[in-house]
Image (cartoon, grey):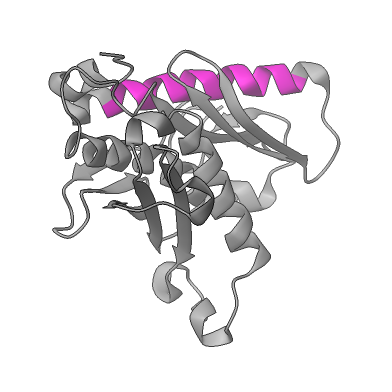
Amino acid sequence: MTRKDGREASELRPVRITKHIQQGPQGSVLIEMGKTKVLCAATVEDHVPPFLRGTGTGWLHAEYALLPSATAVRTPREAARGKQSGRTQEIQRLIGRSLRAVTDTAALGERTIILDCDVIQADGGTRTAAITGSFVALTLACETFYKPGNPFPVKDFLAAVSVGLSQDGEPILDLCYEEDSHAAVDMNVVMTGAGHFVEIQGTGEGRPFTRSEHDTMLALAESGIDALISYQKDVLGNNLVWRVGRVG
C-alpha cells in the first residue's frame, strides 16, 4: 500500500530531533514528525511535592499545550478560557506516566523535573511525538546534575508512535491528521528500549477490530519504535547512550 504522501504502510514520516533549542531549560529539543512539530523542554527544580519531602526521592510530571496557530483553524488558548480541556489533561498525564516508567526517581534525589510539551504545528501524532521528544530532553536534563558512580536517573530508552487501520482495513504506521481522522482504528503505543509496553491506547473509530488485527498493529508499532529509539541514540551520542540504564 502506498499512501497519499508517498510512504509505504510500514514507513515513518521523516523524523528530526534538534537538541538545545532553548537556553533556559536544562534539556530541550524540537521534534519534527512530518509536519507535526513539538517543542519539548525539561526543567530541573530543586524541590519536590510535599508528599515526597524528606524521602530523598524525586518526581517528574508533564504539561502539554496546543498553541493557537498549530492547527489550520485557530484553537483558542485554554488559559483564556480559564481551564484545560479533558484532552489536554489526558495527554499530559500520558506523557508523565510514560516518562516515569523509565525514570529512577530515587536517583533524582529531591528534585522535580517538569516536561513542557508545546505543539507548534499539529498534523497528527502530537502526543506520541511529545513522548519521543521528551525522552531526549529528559536525558539531556539529567546529565546536567548526574555524578559519575551513581545510578543514572534514566533507566531505559522510550518512544511512542501511532498505528491504525485505514478505511480499507490496511495496517498503517505513524498516521498524519488526514489518516487519523478517517481511520477505522486508531492506536497509540508507548514502549521501552527493552521492548516492554508502557501504554497501549486503541480505539475502533469506524468499526471493531479483531485480535489478529490488534497483534498486527502492535508488531508494526514495535518496528516503528525500534527505529525511533535508534534515532534517539544517534541524537544523544555515545556518551549519553552509555549512561542510560547505568546503575553505577
Residue 219 within the segment the image draws in magenta: yes
Q: Is residue 145 left or right of residue 170?
A: left
Q: In this view, does 36 lie above or below 6?
A: below
Residue located 70% across and 17% down the image? 215
Identify the main secondary structure in magenta. helix
Question: What residue sits 20% from the left and 44% below the top?
Answer: 18
Magenta span covers which residues? 213-232
Q: In this view, does 198 lie to the left or right of 48?
A: right
**Residue 171 lies in what quarter of the image?**
top right
Seen from the viewer's position, the closer of residues 22 and 113 is 113
Instruction: Classify 229 as above or below 135.
Output: above
Q: Can residue 36 be seen in this view?
A: no
Q: Residue at x 42, y 70 (%)?
A: 67
Q: Position of residue 84 (x, y in %)?
A: 59, 71
Looking at the rendered image, the quarter that the N terminus falls into is top right
**Within the image, what quadrant is residue 170 found in?**
top right
Where is residue 247? Give x, y as percent. 31, 14
- Number of callouts: 0
For residue 155, above or below residue 47: above
Q: Which of 180 and 238 is in front in this view?
A: 238
> Is residue 30 visible to the viewer in this orientation of the structure?
yes
Residue 132 position in % (x across, y down): 40, 37
Please, which residue is most extreme toward the bottom here?
A: 80
Residue 219 or 50: which is nearer the viewer? 50
121 left or right of 4 in image: left
The C terminus sits in image quarter: top left
Q: 192 or 59, which is in the foreground?
A: 59
For residue 156: magenta?
no
Residue 53 is situated, as x and y percent measured from the top left of the image, at 44, 48
